[in-house]
């Protein structure tokens, strides 16, 4: 596995007048029949003889189920895209009696060495024992974001972001790599605001710092300062989740 740049969790709240509707992304769900433990959809085998009433177009329309690894990656992308509260996801691929553990985060996927859960039953029982005792953070959930009211500490005083109850998600990203930016609509102290959650490279300067420098330099724009400031968001508060860094 090639090394990838480290990532960290970043959440920020910016003042905005945005009133967009949630933008959905297309998702694909596959039904497996390759013995991986997933639900199955009956289909003809690859060598099955077509019936006399089957047209050539219908035969061309038949597609093979994707490999199990593709399916678990698809499920992980859906889970990470569905909510801002997920930092990573675990999944399992079973072939015969061999089970592999897959770990998906925003840096790179990792696969464990497979083991036979019948011949190596004690290891399998130990795995179940550990999984049963994992806290929410152990399953990839960020507890601070998994709330109806999200608290940010800024300048010694807390600020509370309340997500919109109906259409909170106004931007999301379907995928397993990159910043995977998600934006929620809500309010801070009654003011319309958005919360942006992203997973940038640790080497990148904090976005709130870049915006602060840009707003500072607008002071030198003279008579155009007000117009320049209108093009920049106002960062009300921000937070880096150091405990969820992938390094």
Image (cartoon, rainbow, N blue to C red):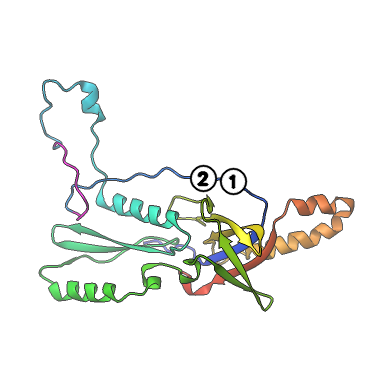
- In the current view of this chain or complex, which residue is farthest to the bottom? 156
Under tag 1, what secondary structure?
Answer: loop
Q: Position of residue 36 (x, y in %)?
A: 20, 54
Examine the residues drawn in magenta and state their main secondary structure: loop
Dot 2 alpha-carbon crowd within 10 angstroms: few under 14, some 14 to 19, many 20 or more:
few
Q: Position of residue 112 (x, y in %)?
A: 28, 66
Mark identifier at residue 20:
1
- Above or below, 244 against 56 in this view is below
Picture quadrant where residue 234 is located: bottom right
- Above or below, 186 against 149 in this view is above
Residue at horizontal 19 percent and vertical 43 percent from the top: 41
Residue at horizontal 66 percent and vertical 65 percent from the top: 189
- In the current view of this chain or complex, which residue is farthest to the right? 223
Q: Could you tell me how many numbered marks the image carries?
A: 2
Left or right: 206, with 148 as reference point = right
Dot 1 alpha-carbon crowd within 10 angstroms: few under 14, some 14 to 19, many 20 or more:
few
Q: Position of residue 190 (x, y in %)?
A: 66, 61
Under tag 2, what secondary structure?
Answer: loop
- Is any part of residue 35 visible from this angle? yes
Asked if disc 2 and disc 1 are in contact, CB closer than 8 Å, the reply is yes
- Which residue range is magenta in the image? 36-44
Q: Which is more toward the observer, 34 or 148? A: 148
Residue at horizontal 42 percent and vertical 42 percent from the top: 26
Q: Which is more toward the observer, 237 or 91? A: 237
Left or right: 234, with 201 as reference point = right
Left or right: 1, with 240 as reference point = left
Mark identifier at residue 23:
2
């Amino acid at each position: 596995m090639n090394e990838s740049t480290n990532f960290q969790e970043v959440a920020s709240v910016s003042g905005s007048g945005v009133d967009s509707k949630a933008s959905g992304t297309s998702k694909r769900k596959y039904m497996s029949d390759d013995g991986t433990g997933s639900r199955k959809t009956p289909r003809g085998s690859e060598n099955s003889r077509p019936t006399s009433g089957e047209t050539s177009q219908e035969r061309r329309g038949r597609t093979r189920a994707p490999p199990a690894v593709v399916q678990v990656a698809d499920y992980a992308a859906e889970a990470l895209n569905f909510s801002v509260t997920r930092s990573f996801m675990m999944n399992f691929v079973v072939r015969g009696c061999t089970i592999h553990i897959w770990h998906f985060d925003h840096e790179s996927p990792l696969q464990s060495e497979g083991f036979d859960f019948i011949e190596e039953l004690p290891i399998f029982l130990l795995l179940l024992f550990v999984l049963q005792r994992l806290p929410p953070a152990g399953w990839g959930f960020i507890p601070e974001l998994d709330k109806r009211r999200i608290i940010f500490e800024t300048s010694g005083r807390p600020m509370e972001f309340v997500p919109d109850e109906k259409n909170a998600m106004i931007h999301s990203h379907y995928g397993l790599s990159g910043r995977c930016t998600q934006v929620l609509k809500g309010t801070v102290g009654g003011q319309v605001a958005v919360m942006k959650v992203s997973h940038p490279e640790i080497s990148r300067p904090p976005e709130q710092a870049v915006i602060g420098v840009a707003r500072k330099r607008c002071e030198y724009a003279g008579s155009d300062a007000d117009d320049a400031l209108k093009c920049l968001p106002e960062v009300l508060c921000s937070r880096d989740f150091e405990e969820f860094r992938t390094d």
